[in-house]
Image (cartoon, grey):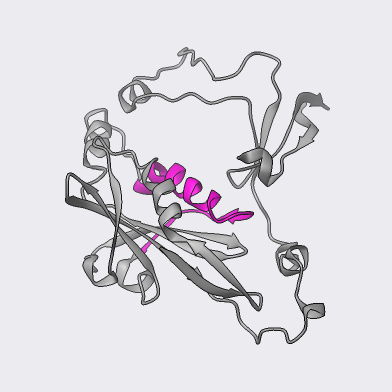
Amino acid sequence: MTTTAAVAGAATFVDAAAVAQAAVALVPSSVPLVAVPCGVADVPTGTDAVVATFVGAPSADLLFVVGDALADVAAAGAAAGTRLEAGDALRPALEAAAAELGAGVLEAVRTEPVAQVLVAGSEVFALQHEGETVAWFAVRVRAGQGAAPTTTAHVPTQRGSMRMLYDVDMTLTAQIGRATLPVRQVLDMVPGTVLELDRAAGSPADVMVNGRLVARGEVVVVDEAYGVRITEIVTDEDRH
């Protein structure tokens, strides 16, 4: 399934099915899920959606209506006296979906009523297990404003179209490694717990901007504070 949207005066094609597939692979469900195309009318409107906006070329709203898909995760947290927010649980899935859209920034996750964010033009997928729908995922591409250029000389470059974002603050983090743990082990963590990460000592740290890998570097100390000396800029080809 492909969505077409006008972005900065040019036609942009989004493979909504690929975006949905990337997202569903990281939904923290206790059962395997598959994304099946459906209609906007199939989604219940009397509930909230977990939404994150991707700003790039194209820009799009990515949203989940989780239904009962996170029931087991929520129950595990409640048993341990911990409340796990749906937005936190679904952030990795939203980041995976955003990566399919190309270069850009995924904004903070928020919660909004389904009736306000799921509108005509959204590509909707039912997340099913053995034919039973337990959640929904949708992609709503944001169309650009303004008339299309009449000559190729006026087609904006990617850098030019992003210039309006130059003064927008973004969160930069340095990541020295990752670990994948079951919810049970996360909830059992106490002071003194040692977690083994997925890379060897001395390996470069990943530099992330709003959760997206942009560079790698070595950890240094600058005036008694940690810093990162950039050693490599990561391109789109390197991410794949």
Q: Which region shows up in magenta? A: 86-112
Taking the magenta stretch, the answer to whether it contains residue 16 is: no
Q: Name the quadrant of the N terminus.
A: bottom left
Residue 141 located left or right of residue 230? left
Q: How many marks?
A: 0
Position of residue 153 relative to residue 208, above or below, is below
Q: Is 91 within the magenta?
A: yes
The quadrant where residue 209 appears: top right
Please report the residue visible at 63 percent of the width from the left and 40 percent of the height from the top.
239
Where is residue 145? Give x, y as percent: 61, 82
Q: Quadrant of residue 30?
A: top left
> Which part of the image, by quadrant, shows the C terminus?
top right
Q: Locate residue 172, reporting x and y percent.
A: 67, 43
Q: Is residue 43 left or right of residue 110?
A: left
Please give the name of the residue rendered at 26% of the width and 43% of the height, measured from the top-left corner.
Answer: 70
Residue depicted at x 33% and y 63%? 124
User: Is 105 above or below relative to 206?
Assistant: below
Q: Is residue 12 above or below residue 218?
A: below
